[in-house]
Amino acid sequence: MNDSTQEPKQSWWRRLSAGLKRTSSSLGTAVADLVTKRKLDRAMLDDIEDVLLRADLGTEVAARIAEAVGKGRYDKSVSAEDVTTIVATEVEKVLGPVAKPLEIDAAQKPFVILVVGVNGSGKTTTIGKLAAKLSAEGRKVMLAAGDTFRAAAIEQLKVWGERNKVPVVARAQGSDSASLAFEAVEAARAQAMDVLLIDTAGRLQNKTELMVELEKVRRVIGKVDSSAPHAVLLVLDATVGQNALSQVDAFHKTAGVTGLVMTKLDGTARGGILVALSEKYKLPVHFIGVGEGIDDLAPFTARDFARAIAGQDN
Ligand SMILES: Nc1nc2c(ncn2[C@@H]2O[C@H](COP(=O)(O)OP(=O)(O)OP(=O)(O)O)[C@@H](O)[C@H]2O)c(=O)[nH]1
Ligand SMILES: [Mg+2]
């Protein structure tokens, strides 16, 4: 263990800013190319807006940033730094209201967290990382292997359980995942657990029967405790870019998503999508995944993310 308290933050900031480097440096280079040897005019602002759209920031945010750049600067020369500073400021304004910690209500025993998302987005890994965080805070955590489709998925969750020294409720492959979830809530209650994290099978947002199954899981959990699930986390893979928008749409409608986790920000040029999502859906963003390891889950903070996107130093 490193005894410097700065160390963990430094390392995830490094991974986040390095991960978003492809976004920030292509944005920075494109902006620099646009602003050199020219005075600001409408055409330049349109070009800047295009660059921002290509960074996945979304039409509203791109237009707003271009407008902010234009304000009071027509016929003047602007620097690339002026523009990226405005990018960071405007992005932070969008992210500020959605950057919210995941609050565990201690009055709910167990506090039930259902984890949903498309195939391979990082659900199981995020559960493993979250279990570590919550246990470190002194909470009694239990996991439920609600992804009953694949034997490997059950094994994967059990490995995270062992690593974290927390119990895992699991059944044989092919069991009904709603009844597994029901059983897990009862077990967590009987064993006075603080938090129950329920894994689910990955499902594409356009596969109706799988989305209906998720609705059932949700409903059945509510039969044990009508206030549960207390949180429904949608895990999104940053590398999918624009597809994340339809994922949020579909999962929100079916599962009543209460918050987002965005993974794989350690290696993507598409992290800007989180800005477009925040602008459109305004769902809380709790955590970001910046690697595959147990410690690679960082609380989401608007300023850090905005500065990383804009390629600024922390
Ligand atoms: N680089 C990186 N890899 C990640 C991150 N989160 C998860 N992964 C990796 O992504 C892959 C899929 O992760 P899982 O946790 O199995 O994803 P899942 O959503 O449970 O997948 P299914 O159960 O198949 O739907 C694994 O190889 C993880 O190690 C992250 O933040 N960064
Ligand atoms: Mg999984």
Image (cartoon, rainbow, N blue to C red):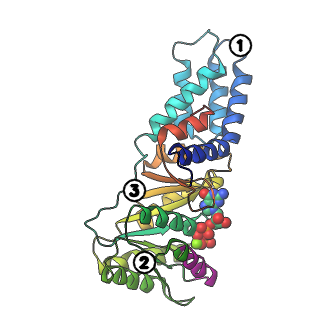
Q: Which of marks 1 and 2 precedes in the sequence? A: 1
The answer to whether 75 is drawn above or below residue 71 in the figure is above
The picture places residue 112, in percent across and down from the top left corner, at 37, 70
Could one spot residue 206 in this view of the protein? no
Q: Residue at x 28, y 64 (%)?
A: 106
Q: In the rendered structure, find residue 38 and report the number of the disc placed on it.
A: 1
Is residue 51 or residue 302 the one in the foreground?
302
Q: Residue at x 59, y 38 (%)?
A: 308
Question: Quick check: marks 2 and 1 in contact, CB under 8 Å?
Answer: no
How many numbered circles are shown?
3
Mark toward the viewer: 3 or 2: 3
Q: Residue at x 51, y 71 (%)?
A: 164
CA gap between label 2 and label 1 equals: 58 Å
Disc 2 secondary structure class: helix
Q: In the rendered structure, find residue 102 and report the number of the disc placed on it.
A: 3
Q: Residue furthest top?
A: 75
The answer to whether 88 is drawn above or below residue 140 in the figure is above
Disc 1 secondary structure class: loop
The range drawn in magenta is 149-160
Question: Quick check: marks 3 and 1 in contact, CB under 8 Å?
Answer: no
| Crowdedness near tag 3: few (<14), some (14–19) or many (≥20) residues, C-alpha within 10 Å | some
Magenta highlight: main SS: helix
The picture places residue 88, in percent across and down from the top left corner, at 54, 31
Q: Amino acid at mark 1?
A: Arg
- Name which quarter of the figure residue 86 lies in: top right
Is residue 27 or residue 168 the one in the foreground?
168
CA gap between label 3 and label 1 equals: 46 Å
